[in-house]
Amino acid sequence: MDFVRFGEIRVSRLILGSNPFSGFSHHGPEMDLQMMRYYKTGKIKETLFEAQRLGINTVVSRTDHHVMRFLLEYWDEGGTLQWFAQTCPEVGPQEMCVERAVSGQARACHIHGGVADHLYAQGRLDELVPVVRQIHETGMLAGIAGHQPGVIKWAEENLEVDYYMCSYYNPIGRDDNPEHVRGMAETYLEKDRKVMTDLIKGLSRPVIHYKVMAAGRNDPAEAFAYAAGCMRPEDAVCVGVYTEKNPEMLEEDVNLLGKYLARAEK
């Protein structure tokens, strides 16, 4: 496994995402429920230890009660993955989420992409300036996620962050609601992927590339080949896995990323 540096923090090029652990399938309520039934706490911890065995050292997950519970159990049982926390609008204000990240010993904290998209649509992104300041004051790295390229452009000009999380796709509108609405129709467009990856080339901070699989809609080999071709030497990629039908999925993802990064470097 290759690693990069986010400030003083060593980060694996492949970061484990956790949407499937919370039943966010992006394929509808039936699949959401299937994921939740599969990912009982024991299965989640098994997946975290598998990631650790494969050389992954970082997990991105929400600042909610469910996540913080399984991470605590995992660490108590000898787990070593570091937590990059994502604020969570269902829990409460962004400031409360930052406090929860601190209490859960996160190494970094970033603004939820849906929240940032919503504030962008409302013309209220300035509200994030004190939140980023609060994150830095705790000693954590600070970041911002976004599905809208406009969010990342604004952050590049107005925020002192340590990293960006850039979604390849903008599947649902967040104009009226920052939260993910289960069952809402989602759209994954190639033009959105192209716009975001073109933007990434000129950013001044490391980027975590996410939603590279279009929530399982893209062929894994194509998705990792594309991402590897767009990742700069300082960047990483975040993917979640749903292993019910393919227990080797995470190892296959690690191998695909390594294969296509090696090709890209040539």
Image: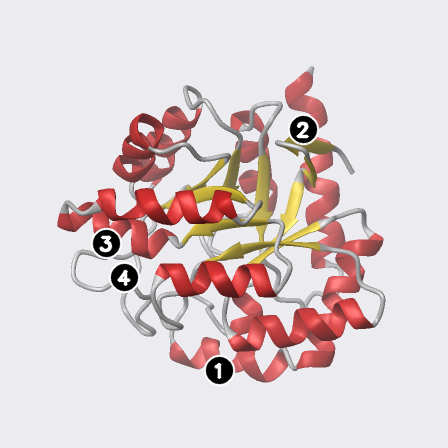
Marking on residue 178: 4
Q: In this view, does 86 lie to the left or right of 14?
A: left
The amino acid on which the numbered mark 3 sits, given as a three-letter code, is His
Return the x and y of residue 199 as percentages of the image width and height.
37, 26
Return the x and y of residue 20 as percentages of the image width and height.
55, 67
The amino acid on which the numbered mark 4 sits, given as a three-letter code, is Pro
Mark 2 or 4, which is nearer the eye?
Answer: 4
Query: Which residue is tagged 1?
Result: 33
Which of the two labelled residues, at mark 4 and mark 1, occupies the earlier sequence position? 1
Indicate the secondary structure of the residue bearing disc 2. Answer: helix
* Distance between the alpha carbons at the discs numbered 1 and 2: 35 Å
At x 68%, y 80%, the residue is: 41
* Distance between the alpha carbons at the discs numbered 2 and 4: 34 Å
Mark 4 or 1, which is nearer the eye?
Answer: 4
Which of the two labelled residues, at mark 3 and mark 1, occupies the earlier sequence position? 1
Return the x and y of residue 98 as percentages of the image width and height.
47, 58
- Binning the other alpha carbons within 10 Å of mark 1 as few (below 14), some (14 to 19) or many (20 upward) gives some
Indicate the secondary structure of the residue bearing disc 4. Answer: loop
| Residue 266, picture quadrant | top right
* Distance between the alpha carbons at the discs numbered 3 and 1: 26 Å
Query: Which residue is tagged 3?
Result: 118
Circles 1 and 2: CB atoms closer than 8 Å: no
The amino acid on which the numbered mark 1 sits, given as a three-letter code, is Leu
Circles 4 and 3: CB atoms closer than 8 Å: yes
Query: Which residue is tagged 2?
Result: 261
Mark 3 or 1, which is nearer the eye?
Answer: 3
Indicate the secondary structure of the residue bearing disc 1. Answer: helix
